[in-house]
Every structure is written in structure tokens, then in C-alpha cells.
Amino acid sequence: SERTLVLVKPDGVQRGLVGEVVSRIERKGLSLAALELRQVEQQVAEQHYAEHDGKPFFGSLLEFITSGPVVAMVVEGPRAIAAFRQLAGGTDPVDKAAPGSIRGDYGLEVQFNLVHGSDSAESAEREIKLWFPDLGE
Ligand code: ATP
């Protein structure tokens, strides 16, 4: 079994899509190891998106992710990382995410793509430590 860090970003929370996202995760057969509604601190946002530091959208990405509460979750199950990436769909909700995926069904703009999911085992470990430092193995 594997763990991944999932976020419902401020746009998803604001639009009332938390239940929809959690429902899709559960229906897929994945389970929740942690779930919390929280305001993102600047420092957590910067560390979470450290790989994008220097890119033209970095500033607006930080502004967006700290603009309202997010729902952070640790999602668990066989191949949880790839399984949630499949549920989410590609980064661009129109060009890349297929209909039937979360972004494909509910998103329009790349910045406002509703959810985040860790993209590798290394990212998942780093992100779970960052968001849920007290969660055991
Ligand atoms: P996430 O890491 O949130 O799951 P991702 O792995 O699909 O998304 P990344 O390429 O890591 O996509 O980009 C991280 C986030 O930065 C995206 O989810 C999106 O919100 C934002 N982003 C990416 N590209 C752009 C862009 N060109 N303009 C604005 N925002 C962008």
C-alpha cells in the first residue's frame, strides 16, 4: 500500500467540491489516512511549490494557494499516487484532463485546477511530512 498527499485547492473548497473529490477517492477504493481543512501558511506554500520557484507563475501560484482554506488529505491504497493522478486528470483542465476526471469535469483554467496530488513516491514522502508532520508511518 502507498500514500499520497492530496489537496482540494482554494477554488475547489470555495466552489463546494470537497465532497465530490472525497467521494471519487472513496469510490475508487482508496482510503483516507488524514483529512484537515486549513489555511495555508506562506512557508508551507513556498516549500510545497519549491520546484516552481523562479517560474513566471510562481508568485500568483503562492497567492492563489494561500487565498483561502484548502482541504489537505493523506490518501492511502495500492498505487495511490498514480490512482489519484488518474482521478485528477492532467494539469490543464481543458487541454490535458479528460472528461470524467476531476479537472476535466470541473476545471477551466490551469491555475484553478481544483486539486493537487503528489507526482512521485519522493514527492509524496516530502509533502506528507510537510503537511502532516505528526502522522506516523
Ligand atoms: P499539482 O502539483 O498541483 O498536482 P501538477 O503536478 O498537475 O499540479 P505542476 O506542473 O506541478 O502541475 O504545476 C503545479 C501547479 O501550478 C498546477 O496545478 C497549477 O495550479 C499551477 N500551474 C502550472 N502551470 C501553470 C501555468 N502555466 N500558469 C499558471 N499556473 C500554473
Image (tube, grey):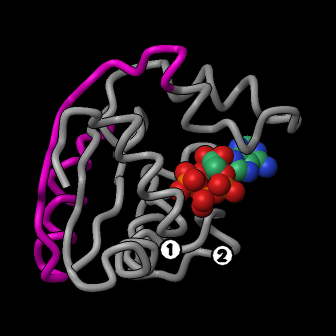
Q: Is residue 132 above or below residue 33?
A: above
What element does badge 2 sit on? loop
Determine which residue is flagged by label 2. Answer: 96
Q: Quadrant of residue 10?
A: top left
Disc 1 crowd rating (10 Å Cα; few below 14, some 14-19, many 20+) is many
- Residue 13 visible in image: yes
Disc 2 crowd rating (10 Å Cα; few below 14, some 14-19, many 20+) is few
Q: Is residue 55 above or below residue 67?
A: below
Q: At 72% across and 44% down in the image, what residue appears?
A: 51
Q: CA distance from mark 1 to mark 2?
A: 7 Å
Q: Amino acid at mark 2?
A: Lys
Q: Is mark 2 within 8 Å of ligand 1?
A: no
Query: The magenta stretch spans which residues?
Result: 15-44
Q: Is residue 4 above or below residue 135?
A: below
Q: Is residue 42 magenta?
A: yes
Q: Give the residue furthest to the top.
A: 42
Q: At 68% across and 36% down in the image, what residue appears?
A: 50
Q: At 24% across and 53% down in the image, what residue appears?
A: 74
Q: At 28% across and 41% down in the image, what residue appears?
A: 72
Which of the two residues, 123 or 66, is positioned nearer the viewer here?
123
- Residue 110 visible in image: no
x, y percentage for residue 70?
33, 32
Determine which residue is flagged by label 1. Answer: 89
